[in-house]
Amino acid sequence: MLIRKIIALSLAATAVGCWSMSAKNSGSRSVNAETDPTPFATPRPKASATDTPANSSSTSTSNMTVTGKFYDNLPKTLSHPTDDVSKLLLREYGSVFVTKATPPAKIVFEDESDVAAFQKSFASESASIGGFTVTLQKPAMDALKAAIADAGKQGISIGPRGGDSSKRTYAQTVTLWASRVRPALAHWSAAGKISKADAARISSLSPFQQVPEVLGLEAKGMWFAKDFSKSIIYSVAPPGTSQHLSMLALDVKQFDDPRVREILAKHGWFQTVSSDLPHFTYLGADESNLPSLGLKKVESGNRTFWVPDI
């Protein structure tokens, strides 16, 4: 128990101290607070006045590897993470980095201009699907259209959940992030876990700077998800990390239909984020080839998720 406490405390310090240029030169996960289930591989400890860092396993990186097939298949231009925060984000959202389309240029995009520059670096396409405009990278859109046509032959519909189900801007991810951070800071300040001055200081930081601060507090048992019972990364994506920024993600309305999941997988679309059930990621590879890209298959709730094997 003592060893686990020491490890968690170390993570808290590292999260704040090592969030540096390595993260800037290295983004991605989508969120859906409406589903917000417990992730398959992470316990969901309840935050309380007696919480200790030993209960903070949701942000642990102590068992992660830094070598293997997944790292071998990362883009050559992507700097491998050296700090615990970036390692954690890569583990949670990193499947997109082995896509056959254009992967994100960084583990974390720092601001709107950073995202905009990346979004201009590849061909994209917009289409009206299910009454909403869907914008994706060209290969992802081609595969989606093929899946929709395939499903249509079977009398099955595939479409987006809403207007923000595909491409997103950095500002949209900031809004989602703030919707969790502000209430959590107020909650933990009122509970006497952090000072009002420290809460105000964190509030004044840029979203990019807030990420390691928030994860550092979570390593001490102060959870930032909507109900303060688990990590914020299982509720919303830290700004600059959403797969939607890369136009390689789609929140699918019919995500509960196993036939839809099977058809999407046939066309290179897979579930890669365990805490976001409607979220599908375009990888563009046959499912049988995903292990060779460094992804592992995890079954949960009769669903298959392909996540980094690190």
Image (cartoon, rainbow, N blue to C red):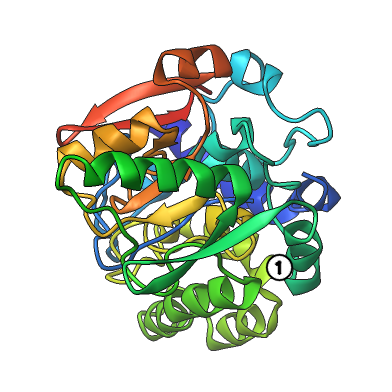
User: In the rendered view, would you say 121 is above or below 295?
Assistant: below
Question: Can you tell which quarter of the image residue 149 is in?
Answer: top left
Looking at the picture, how far across and down is residue 119, in whole percent? 72, 60
- Inspect the image, locate mark 1, and give the three-letter code of the amino acid beneath it: Gln
- Out of 3 and 181, give the one closest to the viewer: 181
User: In the rendered view, would you say 109 is above or below 259?
Assistant: below
Is any part of residue 290 visible from this angle? yes
Asked if residue 243 lies left or right of residue 33, the reply is right
Asked if residue 66 lies left or right of residue 187, the reply is right
User: In the rendered view, would you say 211 is above or below 272?
Assistant: below
Asked if residue 181 lies left or right of residue 266, the reply is right
Question: Can you tell which quarter of the image residue 305 is in?
Answer: top left
Q: Quadrant of the N terminus?
A: top left
- Out of 177 and 230, give the one closest to the viewer: 177
User: In the rendered view, would you say 236 is above or below 148?
Assistant: below
Q: Name the residue under label 1.
A: 209
Looking at the picture, how far across and down is residue 75, in whole percent? 75, 30
Residue at image point 40% right, 83% down: 183
Residue at image point 48% right, 14% down: 289
Residue at image point 77% right, 44% down: 26
Looking at the picture, how far across and down is residue 195, in whole percent? 53, 82
Residue at image point 48% right, 62% down: 166
Looking at the picture, how far across and down is residue 62, in whole percent? 54, 29
- Out of 88 and 7, give the one closest to the viewer: 88
Give the secondary structure at mark 1.
Answer: helix
